[in-house]
Image (cartoon, rainbow, N blue to C red):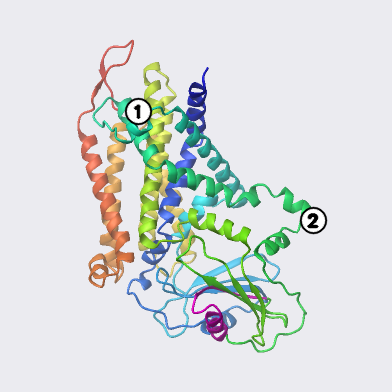
């Protein structure tokens, strides 16, 4: 057996086994490229394009009025072009429980906006499947499988440049799917290789923690603190004096950084005399924000430490920025979106090739593989559309509104899976109906948005708000594509010849 033959088996099974999981990861990561735009779309209060007039001190005042528990720390982020509102988070001392709110920019004083999962839902689904550390390890293992499948796929392709220009959609099923698999695999190969590698590399300290655990006697936070060069001051267990203005410290940080933008501002042990304020630099023009930090005494405003990221940490941030498209603006995020969709298409084509090769063997288990294919490949996008419908239809005053949106997503996906199982022997008809459902859901969302919010598509376009309008435009494009595909599947299925059996017409 030569190298190509051995790599063929590795490519088939290394890509097949995690393929459904990889589809979820890649699809969620693709949507997460525009997570902040989705955050804004899912909050109607932000559709008017109002610029917040609130300051950091206003946000801290709201926290002091509404949270009476002693805090371990709190952190905030000011408005940006993609997120025109203040964000606030805090941790109650001794609980390790985190709370987060976002504020309506339309008022003079901070008032929280209704809860929503927002685009962050897809970001978390991408990197840990909403399953904490266990999910993060599963995603890392899937990423390693993807690297193996990509490298072995490159080895077995003898005509990689020819595959780039070959697509025969009207050929027999296996040939057409193989062409599609090859085309999307070749087009996105450098992108998928880099994203798979960086996705594993940026979590390497979590995947292989033994060195840090041994070197720092189990104190992993000390390890991360030294790597980042962060400043820490022990608590004095004495009451804190009146705090210094956060807005003044932000202005001072901008001056020291020659006018650079400020990102996260965090206050540690705010109720203790040892309280410190960390002001972090933000630079969206680089691949990976530098994470330079200025630390001040929270009471006197004295500059205690100036943290400039080390060379090694900057290299890590560069990999993280490359993976998460933290550079280049909307054009780069759009490129990531297109390449991510190519990755999804590559996985779909590869599984269809695997199925087509085994159709003539009469394996009854294939019908369940088809059902699983539909449950994942069609079920996840449909459940995502259902989540957006839930965001608009669940009342703003509903208790635990974000959790309710999550249950809409889960319930819709389970219904799609059940539908796929019940219609498993009529896969072509099932796919046609699901495409029609996708078209209705996608095309209906811009209309629903116009009825339930002030930022409807025409209003967004009229004021040149392309960030908000892009969500509705993408939904319209997706709905039209679903309609076109459903029309194609409405045609009578092609007559296929199965070796060893009489010719018959099958619903594929």
Residue extending farthest to the top is 500
Q: Closest to the observer: 374 or 212?
A: 212
The vertical placement of 9 against 112, above or below, is above
Residue drawn at x 23%, y 27% as measured from the top left: 493
Q: Which residue, given by chain and number where applicable, does mark 1 sit on?
A: 425
Is residue 406 shown in magenta? no
Quadrant containing the C terminus in the rendered view = top left
Q: Closest to the observer: 318 or 390?
A: 318
Q: Secondary structure at mark 1?
A: loop
Circle on res. 490: none
The vertical placement of 229 against 312, above or below, is below
Residue 199 point in image, percent of width and height: 53, 49
Is residue 262 shown in magenta? yes
Residue 217 point in image, percent of width and height: 79, 56
284 lies left or right of 91: left
Segment tinted magenta in the rendering: 246-268
Residue 400 point in image, percent of width and height: 49, 64
Residue drawn at x 47%, y 30% as measured from the top left: 155
Quadrant assignment, res 256: bottom right
Residue 183 point in image, percent of width and height: 34, 36
Q: Closest to the observer: 2 or 218?
A: 2
Quadrant assignment, res 172: top left
Residue drawn at x 70%, y 61% as measured from the top left: 221
495 lies left or right of 334: left
Q: Which residue, given by chain and number where applicable, does mark 2 sit on?
A: 217
């Amino acid at each position: 057996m030569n190298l190509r033959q051995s790599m063929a088996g590795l490519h088939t099974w290394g890509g097949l086994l995690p393929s459904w999981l990889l589809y979820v990861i890649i699809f969620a990561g693709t949507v997460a490229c525009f997570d902040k735009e989705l955050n804004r779309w899912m909050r109607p209060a932000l559709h008017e394009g109002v610029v917040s007039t609130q300051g950091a001190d206003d946000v801290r005042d709201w926290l002091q009025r509404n949270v009476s528990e002693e805090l371990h720390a709190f952190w905030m982020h000011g408005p940006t072009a993609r997120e025109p509102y203040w964000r606030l988070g805090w941790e109650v001392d001794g609980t390790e429980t985190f709370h987060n709110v976002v504020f309506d920019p339309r008022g003079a004083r901070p008032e929280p906006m209704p809860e929503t999962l927002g685009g962050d839902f897809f970001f978390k689904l991408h990197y840990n499947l909403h399953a904490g550390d266990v999910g993060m390890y599963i995603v890392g293992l899937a990423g390693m499988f993807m690297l193996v499948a990509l490298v072995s796929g490159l080895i077995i392709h003898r005509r990689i440049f020819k595959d780039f220009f070959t697509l025969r959609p009207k050929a027999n099923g296996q040939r057409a799917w193989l062409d599609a698999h090859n085309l999307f695999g070749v087009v996105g190969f450098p992108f998928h290789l880099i994203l798979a590698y960086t996705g594993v590399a940026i979590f390497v300290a979590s995947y292989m923690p033994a060195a840090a655990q041994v070197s720092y006697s189990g104190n992993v936070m000390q390890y991360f603190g030294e790597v980042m060069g962060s400043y820490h001051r022990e608590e004095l267990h004495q009451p804190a004096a009146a705090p210094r203005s956060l807005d003044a410290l932000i202005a001072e940080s901008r001056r020291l950084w020659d006018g650079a933008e400020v990102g996260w501002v965090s206050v540690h042990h705010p109720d203790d005399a040892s309280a410190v304020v960390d002001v972090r630099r933000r630079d969206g023009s680089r691949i990976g924000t530098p994470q330079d930090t200025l630390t001040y005494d929270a009471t006197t405003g004295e500059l205690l430490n100036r943290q400039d990221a080390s060379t090694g940490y900057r290299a890590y941030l560069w990999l993280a920025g490359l993976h998460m498209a933290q550079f280049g603006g909307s054009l780069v995020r759009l490129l990531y979106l297109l390449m991510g969709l190519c990755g999804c298409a590559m996985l779909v084509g590869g599984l269809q090739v695997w199925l087509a090769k085994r159709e003539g063997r009469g394996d009854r288990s294939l019908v369940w593989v088809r059902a699983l294919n539909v449950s994942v490949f069609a079920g996840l996008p449909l459940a995502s559309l259902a989540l957006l419908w839930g965001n608009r239809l669940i009342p703003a005053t509903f208790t635990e509104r974000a959790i309710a949106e999550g249950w809409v997503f889960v319930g819709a996906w389970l219904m799609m899976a059940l539908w796929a199982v019940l219609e498993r022997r009529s896969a072509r008809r099932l796919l046609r109906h699901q495409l029609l459902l996708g078209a209705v859901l996608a095309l209906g969302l811009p209309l629903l948005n116009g009825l339930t919010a002030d930022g409807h598509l025409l209003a967004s376009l009229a004021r040149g708000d392309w960030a908000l309008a892009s969500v509705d435009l993408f939904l319209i494009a997706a709905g039209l594509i679903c309609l076109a595909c459903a029309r194609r599947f409405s045609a009578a299925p092609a007559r296929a010849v199965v070796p060893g059996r009489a010719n018959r017409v099958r619903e594929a």
